[in-house]
Amino acid sequence: MSGKVVLLTDRRYLNQVPRVPSQLEAPTGFVADALGRPLRDLRISVTDRCNFRCVYCMPKEVFGRDYAFLPQSSLLSFEEVMRIAKIAVAHGVEKIRLTGGEPLLRKHIEKLIAALSVLKMPDGRELDLTLTTNGALLERMAQTLKDAGLKRVTVSLDALDDATFKHMNDVDFPVSQVLNGIDAAHRVGLGQIKVNMVVKGGMNDQEIVPMARHFKNSPFILRFIEYMDVGTSNGWRMNEVIPSAEVVRRISALMPLEPIEKNDAGETAERWRYRDGAGEIGVISSVSQAFCHACSRARLSTEGKLYTCLFASSGHDLRALMREGRSDEEISTAIAHLWRARTDRYSALRTGHTNVRKVEMSYIGG
Ligand code: SAM
Ligand code: SF4
Ligand code: SF4
C-alpha cells in the first residue's frame, strides 16, 4: 500500500451551522466586521453546474462525466434565496450579483431576478442587481433578463482568438457567440456592460493587446483579472500570474493610458483611461495587490452556505437554519454575529499556505 492519503468524505465543504444567539436583534441597515468593513455586497451562486470547463476554474480532469454535482434537493429554492437576500439587504447590502457555475443554466432564473428586482434598501433606494455569465446563452436570454428587472450584466471572455478561447473553455465554444451575446445585452439595455478576461500567463496573455484594441472605443469596459489560486482544482502556480502592472504596461506602450479615480472605495477594479479619450479599462489585482482592507462582500453558495471570504474553507450553513424552522429574526441575528466576527483577509496574507483545501469558485461563485 502506498502512503498516499485518500479523502473518503465529500468535504464540499466543511459545514458550520451558525449559532443563534438567545438575544435577538433587529437589523439596523449597517453591520461591520471585526476589521470595520461593512456588509454591502452579496454574491449568490444559483447553480454549481456549467456548460464550460474553463481550465482555470472547472478543469475537465476534475469536473468530468463522473463528477457529482449537487442534487436538486440540495439547492436553495428561490423562496429560500429571497429570505436570505431580504435579510442581507436589511443589514446594508446594496449590490446583489447572481453567479455560479453558469447562472443562466438555472431553470427560471428570470423568476428569481423578478423577485430580487423589487427589493428596496432600508432608505428606499433600488438595489444594484447584476449577473456574471460566460455569455453562451446570453443572446437568447438577454431580453428575458432585462424584462425581469436585471440592471446590468458582466460577461466573461478570455480571448478573441477562437483557438485560444476554445482551448480555455475546453468545450469548443466559439468567440463569435459570446460577442453576439454581449451585443444582444447592449441592444436590450442591460446597463454598462463589463467584459472580464482572466489572464493566465503562457495561455492567453498574447490576447491582452488584441482584446484591449477590440473593446477600445466601444460601449463596453474590459477588465483584466489576475489568475487566482481559488479552490484546489486548477493547479495554480504563481509564475502563471501576469500582474496587472504588466497588463497596463503592455497596453500603454501601444495605446497610452492614465489612471483614474475608483467609483467607490469598495470597488475591486483599478481604472485606467486611454489618453486619446477612447474609453477605459479596469484591472483587478487580486493577487499582486490585495484589496481585503475594503472587502465588503459575502457569498451565498448554491446550497445556502454563507462564505465571508472567497478563500474560506468552510461556510455557515444558513439552509440548515431555514430548514429547521428558524425565524427571520433568528437568522438575521445569526448573520449579524458571524459578520461581526469576520477577520478574513486571505489575499493580504497570501504566503506559502496555498495547499489548504479551499472552496471551488464554481461552487460559491466568483
Ligand atoms: N460562469 C460565469 C462566468 O464565467 O462568468 C460566472 C461564474 S465564474 C466562477 C465568475 C468569474 O470568475 C468569471 O469571470 C471567471 O473568469 C472568474 N474566475 C474563475 N476562476 C478564476 C480564477 N482561478 N482566477 C481568476 N478568476 C477566475
Ligand atoms: Fe464555468 Fe464560469 Fe467557471 Fe468558466 S469561469 S468554468 S464559465 S463557472
Ligand atoms: Fe475579500 Fe477574502 Fe478576497 Fe480578501 S481574500 S478581498 S477578504 S474575499
Image (cartoon, rainbow, N blue to C red):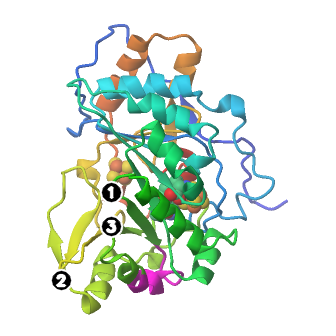
- Callout 3: few (<14), some (14-19), or many (20+) C-alpha neighbours within 10 Å? some
Q: Amino acid at mark 3?
A: Pro
Which percent across, then down, holds residue 351? 38, 63
Q: Amino acid at mark 2?
A: Asp
Judging depth in this view, the residue of 271 and 285 nearest the camera is 271
Residue placed furthest toward the front:
187
Residue at the image point whose x is 70% and y is 60% from the top: 62
Residue placed furthest toward the bottom:
254
Which percent across, then down, holds residue 97? 42, 44
Point out the tag, 2 or 3, that comes first from the N-terminus.
Answer: 3
Q: Disc 3 on helix, strand or loop?
A: loop
Q: Can residue 144 be seen by looking at this rendering?
A: yes
User: Within the image, what quadrant is residue 214 found in?
Assistant: bottom left
Residue tagged 3:
219
Total numbered circles = 3
Q: Amino acid at mark 1?
A: Gln
Residue at the image point whose x is 53% and y is 44% from the top: 144
Q: Disc 2 on helix, strand or loop?
A: loop
Against 250, residue 179 (above or below) is above
Residue at the image point whose x is 42% and y is 14% from the top: 328
User: Within the image, what quadrant is residue 138 found in?
Assistant: bottom right
Point out the tag, 1 or 3, that comes first from the N-terminus.
Answer: 1
Magenta stretch holds residue 201: yes
Q: Which residues are magenta?
A: 199-210
Residue at the image point whose x is 65% and y is 70% from the top: 173
Against 77, residue 106 (above or below) is below
Which percent across, then down, holds residue 228? 45, 64
Tell me whether circle 2 and circle 3 mark residues in contact (CB < 8 Å).
no
Against 311, residue 260 (above or below) is below
Residue tagged 2:
276
- Callout 1: few (<14), some (14-19), or many (20+) C-alpha neighbours within 10 Å? some
Tell me whether circle 1 and circle 3 mark residues in contact (CB < 8 Å).
yes
